[in-house]
Image (cartoon, rainbow, N blue to C red):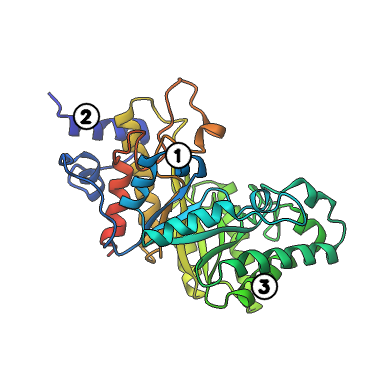
């Protein structure tokens, strides 16, 4: 009779096309039993681990805050610093959420990342009335001055530019539509980065993107367009210090390990660091049984992190949430079989899953 270990490995090979040997590092991670007291302890890991926090459970659920304190060295708000949250009107800035998150981070010895200063999404209605390039520049610069100025020296890493490339770029010069792109063109990206560098010269300035890690022509085109933008910014001596790979991984789509590693190598050749900023595994198209699904999700994350670390050690690994209890995934990728999504490193009872074991593997000793 096959053991659970052999059954799981066979299922992964059959259902997912994964060539995983029982004695391979991945096979060992996925099938070795966890001790009853096995709990991640990330304080001394070589790569800091962190998570995005959602404000409602943060304020109302002690177990949620306890999980963040126990496992995270960094936090980032799911919301709070996005334009729709912080700028409900042209005249007002509302800092309640980020101020709460910052106080929590400082109290518990964590760092807080800033997300985000420029994004096409989550924009308040009033920004649709911006009618000229002059007005757009005034609003964008003033926003960055006010928001970054408030947290100068306290938020040390900012996603200045978020998701600048369309899902399927028509050309290498294609930039995602936004009010800033409509009014100022691509120049708004360099403007934002230069303004951010002026307001906080010590801050790490990051450009953040998703869907560049998979096998397939669409993803290759997006990767190439992103690289073109990064090269152009660096050629113009634009202050840009790191690239954020979100890592919203589609469980059913293979990682282009060679393509991703080549991308990382080029990023490093330009003197840029790499961060994993929003890791989770979208599992709506994976099989239902939790054991198998969790193993598939962990294996996908393993491929992703290994392709990065083959070339360079990321400066941080953050997941987009800490527990399956609170995740954005079912809003867009709800399972059709009625089962709950399981995209994050801890389950709804705050118990670590195989995904957390994979993150620990890379963060703890990333040689």
Which image quarter holds the C terminus?
bottom left
Write down the residue under mark 3.
Answer: 195
> Residue 65: image x %, image y %?
38, 46
Q: Depth check: 36 or 291 in front?
A: 36
What residue is drawn where x is 24% and y is 32%?
A: 8
Which mark sits nearer the N-terminus, 3 or 2?
A: 2
Q: Which mark is residue 7?
A: 2
Q: Quadrant of residue 322?
A: top left
> Residue 236: image x %, image y %?
66, 78
- Separation (CA) of disc 3 from disc 2: 55 Å
- 10 Å neighbourhood of mark 2: few (<14), some, or many (≥20)? some
Q: Which mark is residue 60?
A: 1
Cβ–Cβ under 8 Å for marks 3 and 2: no
Q: Depth check: 71 or 21 in front?
A: 71
Report helix, strand or loop for mark 1: helix
> Residue 163: image x %, image y %?
61, 54
Closer to viewer: mark 3 or mark 2: 3
């Amino acid at each position: 009779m096959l053991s659970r270990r052999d059954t799981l490995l066979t299922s992964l090979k059959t259902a997912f096309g994964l060539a995983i040997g029982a004695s391979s590092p991945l096979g060992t991670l996925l099938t070795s039993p966890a001790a009853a007291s096995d709990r991640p302890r990330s304080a001394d890991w070589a790569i800091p681990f962190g998570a995005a926090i959602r404000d409602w459970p943060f304020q109302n659920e002690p177990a949620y805050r306890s999980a963040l304190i126990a496992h995270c060295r960094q936090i980032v708000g799911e919301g709070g610093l996005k334009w729709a949250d912080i700028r409900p009107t042209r005249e007002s800035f509302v800092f309640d959420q980020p101020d709460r998150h910052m106080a929590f981070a400082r109290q518990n010895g964590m760092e807080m990342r800033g997300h985000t200063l420029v994004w096409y999404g989550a924009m308040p209605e009033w920004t649709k009335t911006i009618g000229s390039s002059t007005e757009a520049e005034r609003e964008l610069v003033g926003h960055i001055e006010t928001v970054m100025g408030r947290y100068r020296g306290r938020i040390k890493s900012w996603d200045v530019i978020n998701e600048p490339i369309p899902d399927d770029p028509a050309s290498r010069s294609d930039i995602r539509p936004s009010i800033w792109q409509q009014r100022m063109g691509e120049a708004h990206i360099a403007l934002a980065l230069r303004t951010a560098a002026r307001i906080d010269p010590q801050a790490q300035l990051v450009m953040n993107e998703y869907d560049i890690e998979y096998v397939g022509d669409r993803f290759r085109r997006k990767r190439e367009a992103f690289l073109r933008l990064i090269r152009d910014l660096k050629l113009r001596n634009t202050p840009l210090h790191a690239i954020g790979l979100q890592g919203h991984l589609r469980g059913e789509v293979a990682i282009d390990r060679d393509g991703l590693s080549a991308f990382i190598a080029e990023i490093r050749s330009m003197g840029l660091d790499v961060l994993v900023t929003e890791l989770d595994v979208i599992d709506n198209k994976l099989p239902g049984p939790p054991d198998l699904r969790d193993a598939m999700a962990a294996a996908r994350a393993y491929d992703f992190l290994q392709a990065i670390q083959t070339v360079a050690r990321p400066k941080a690994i953050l997941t987009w949430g800490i527990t399956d209890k609170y995740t954005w995934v079912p809003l867009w990728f709800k399972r059709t079989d009625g089962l709950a999504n399981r995209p994050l490193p801890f389950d709804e009872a705050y118990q670590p899953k195989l995904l957390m074991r994979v993150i620990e593997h890379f963060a703890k000793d990333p040689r």
